[in-house]
Image (cartoon, helix red, strand yellow):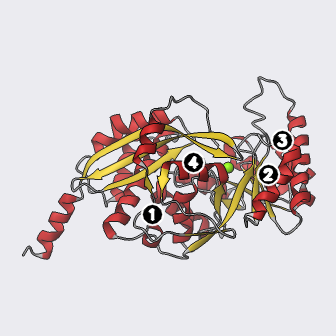
Amino acid sequence: MPTITEQTKLTNASLSIARVTATPMVVEASFEGQPVEFSLCLVAVETRDGRIGHGLTAITEEEVVATAINAVAAPALLGENAMAHERIWEKLYWLLAPRGQTGYALHVIAAIDLALWDLKGKVLGQPVWRLLGAARDRTPVYATFGFDSIERDRLGEAAKEAVSRGFTRLKMTVGNKALSRRDEPRPIGAVIAEDALRIRAVRQAVGDEVELFLDANCGLDPLHAQRLARSVEECGITFFEEPITQNDAPQMAALRRAVRIPLACGQNEGLLYRFRDLLLAGAVDVLQPNVAITGGLTQCLRVAALAQAFNTPIANGGAWTFHNMHLHAGVAHGGLVEYHLPVVAIYEALFRGVPRAEGGWLALPEAPGFGFEPDPDAVRDFAARPLSGGRGKH
Ligand SMILES: [Mg+2]
């Protein structure tokens, strides 16, 4: 019989990282009867004893992130203990972003960190949300349904359809990429005038009982974000997400003082100091770390604690629902999870064992790790599809 110390050494040896692989892919699914596709980077971390954890990242250039993982991060992680998520986070930070650079590096860290948490859950036989503290076993969700691709005269019906499925909180996009498509050109004033009509159409369709959220995906400048927010104040908006370009903290704070609608952002930020700056500036009512983008669960736990110190709620923005639900169920300071309907369809096309929301709530799985697994046939098919930049990057 080995002693406890000898047994621990044996376990640690078997949990050392033997392989890290990243696969960029375009996943296709169906939403509202139309094909939708999202590009993402799926990461697998394998231990010496053959256990595998999976993570992902998206809303970036997946080929670049996959290359950085396969060529730079993977060789550096061989032999590391897969349970040492803090040690590995720190090692990747100093390897990839040593002067505080953000961007692709934090997507790399996010995808690998998620794979490590999936692995940790499998090793310990527990779902990730329970490892984080199991503050609750189900999370409230809001459904993201109202995209630019849906014409205004169909938008009310689409909203009612979501309500009939049990959703009591609905999010719609506004701004329609006004700043990123200035080459077309489209007057930004016309874009927000149409937005106001669309918001009123949805509010009229669903009545006053349903909560309504807006998301400009960083697509407006402060002037037009303010004009839009003021023009729909009577619609009772719960929060306005990423209202202005670059999540500029002083400008967000000025906007927040100028309008009566609560503001939210953070889903595309990488480093912790950016969240500190947003909080110190009084820039947000709701902070939105995203585990698939903001340096993984390890860093989002830090963001959640920081937000708690400022008595500022957190909520999921930027989708990737079924990874983020573990954060929001795990910690007491967790909040709403974004049930992004096209991204839910993407998960269902790529993974087995994905849960479904019922009555506006998402019950957390009992299976170890994240509780769902990539379908090998789907991975092979979607990895073979050609990638092109700019698709499905909500
Ligand atoms: Mg968003």
Residue 173 in view (yes/no):
yes
Name which quarter of the figure residue 87 lies in.
Answer: bottom left
Above-or-below relation of 325 to 190 = below
Q: Which residue is mark 2?
A: 254
Name which quarter of the figure residue 248 lies in.
Answer: top right
Residue type at mark 3? Answer: Glu
Residue at 66% across, 53% down: 341
In this image, 277 relative to 76: left or right? Answer: right
Give residue 62's position: percent from left, percent from top: 49, 36
Q: Which residue is mark 4?
A: 346
Which quadrant: the C terminus?
Answer: top right
Q: Which residue is mark 3?
A: 151
Residue type at mark 2? Answer: Ala
Name which quarter of the figure residue 74 lies in.
Answer: top left
Q: Which residue is mark 1?
A: 371
Which quadrant: the N terminus?
Answer: bottom left
